[in-house]
Image (tube, rainbow, N blue to C red):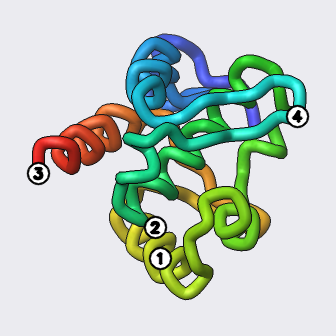
C-alpha cells in the first residue's frame, strides 16, 4: 500500500496510535492503586478494594497500561488474561469473565491474543465511571 499524501481528504482519518494522556491515567489511578517497579506488581489501596468488580478490572488493566508506559513491563505484557486478573484482584473467575464480556460490549476494553487491555481513547469515560461509583 502506498503512502497517503497529506492533501488527501482521508489523510486525517489515519493514525499510527491512539492519543494517550499520561496525566489523566495517573489521576485515575492515584487513589486506587500502588505500582511496584521491582516485581512489577499492582496493589489496590483501600479505595481500590472498595470498587465494584467492573471498577477493579478496569483499574487493574489501567495499572498494567501505566507499567507499560513507564517501561516497567514490555508492550505485550500490558494485556491481562482472566486468570491473571483473578489472581491479582482476588475476584472470582465466574465474575470476571461476564464482566469482561460486558466491558467488551461497551467498548471499554479490547481483547487481542487472549489478553484484555484498555484502549487509550476511553480513559475519560473510565474516569467518569470510577468517579460516579465514588459518589454513590
Of the numbered discs in the image, which one, if any, rests on residue 101? 1
Determine the CA span between mark 1 and mark 2.
5 Å
Label pair 1/4, CB-CB below 8 angstroms: no
Question: The residue tagged with tag 1: helix, strand or loop?
Answer: helix
Neighbourhood count class around disc 4 (C-alpha, 10 Å): few under 14, some 14–19, many 20 upward: few
Label pair 1/3, CB-CB below 8 angstroms: no
Q: Earlier in the sequence, mark 1 or mark 3?
A: 1
Q: Nearer the viewer, residue 125 or 9?
A: 125
Is residue 11 something one can see in this rendering? Answer: no
Q: Earlier in the sequence, mark 1 or mark 4?
A: 4
Quarter of the image with the N terminus in it: top right
Question: The residue tagged with tag 4: helix, strand or loop?
Answer: loop
**Which residue is labeled 3 in the image?**
136
Q: Nearer the viewer, mark 1 or mark 4?
A: 4
Determine the CA span between mark 2 and mark 4.
29 Å
Q: Earlier in the sequence, mark 4 or mark 3?
A: 4
Question: The residue tagged with tag 2: helix, strand or loop?
Answer: helix
Determine the CA span between mark 4 and mark 3.
34 Å
Neighbourhood count class around disc 1 (C-alpha, 10 Å): few under 14, some 14–19, many 20 upward: some
Determine the CA span between mark 1 and mark 3.
24 Å
**Residue drawn at (82%, 45%), measured in percent from left and top?**
77
Q: Earlier in the sequence, mark 3 or mark 2?
A: 2
Question: Residue 78: where, in percent of width, then height?
Answer: 73, 43
Neighbourhood count class around disc 3 (C-alpha, 10 Å): few under 14, some 14–19, many 20 upward: few
Question: The residue tagged with tag 3: helix, strand or loop?
Answer: loop
In the image, residue 17 above or below residue 115 = above
**Residue drawn at (50%, 38%), measured in percent from left and top?**
45
Label pair 1/2, CB-CB below 8 angstroms: yes
**Which residue is labeled 2 in the image?**
104
Determine the CA span between mark 3 and mark 2.
24 Å
Amino acid at each position: 500500500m502506498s503512502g497517503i499524501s497529506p492533501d488527501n481528504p482521508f489523510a486525517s482519518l489515519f493514525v499510527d496510535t491512539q492519543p494517550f494522556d499520561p496525566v489523566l491515567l495517573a489521576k485515575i489511578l492515584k487513589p486506587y492503586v500502588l505500582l511496584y517497579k521491582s516485581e512489577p506488581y499492582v496493589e489496590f489501596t483501600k479505595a481500590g478494594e472498595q470498587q465494584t468488580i467492573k471498577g477493579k478490572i478496569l483499574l487493574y488493566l489501567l495499572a498494567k497500561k501505566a507499567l507499560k508506559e513507564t517501561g516497567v513491563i514490555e508492550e505485550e505484557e500490558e494485556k491481562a488474561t482472566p486468570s491473571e486478573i483473578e489472581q491479582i484482584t482476588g475476584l472470582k473467575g465466574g465474575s470476571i469473565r461476564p464482566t469482561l464480556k460486558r466491558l467488551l460490549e461497551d467498548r471499554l476494553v479490547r481483547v487481542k491474543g487472549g489478553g484484555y487491555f484498555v484502549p487509550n481513547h476511553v480513559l475519560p469515560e473510565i474516569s467518569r465511571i470510577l468517579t460516579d461509583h465514588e459518589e454513590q
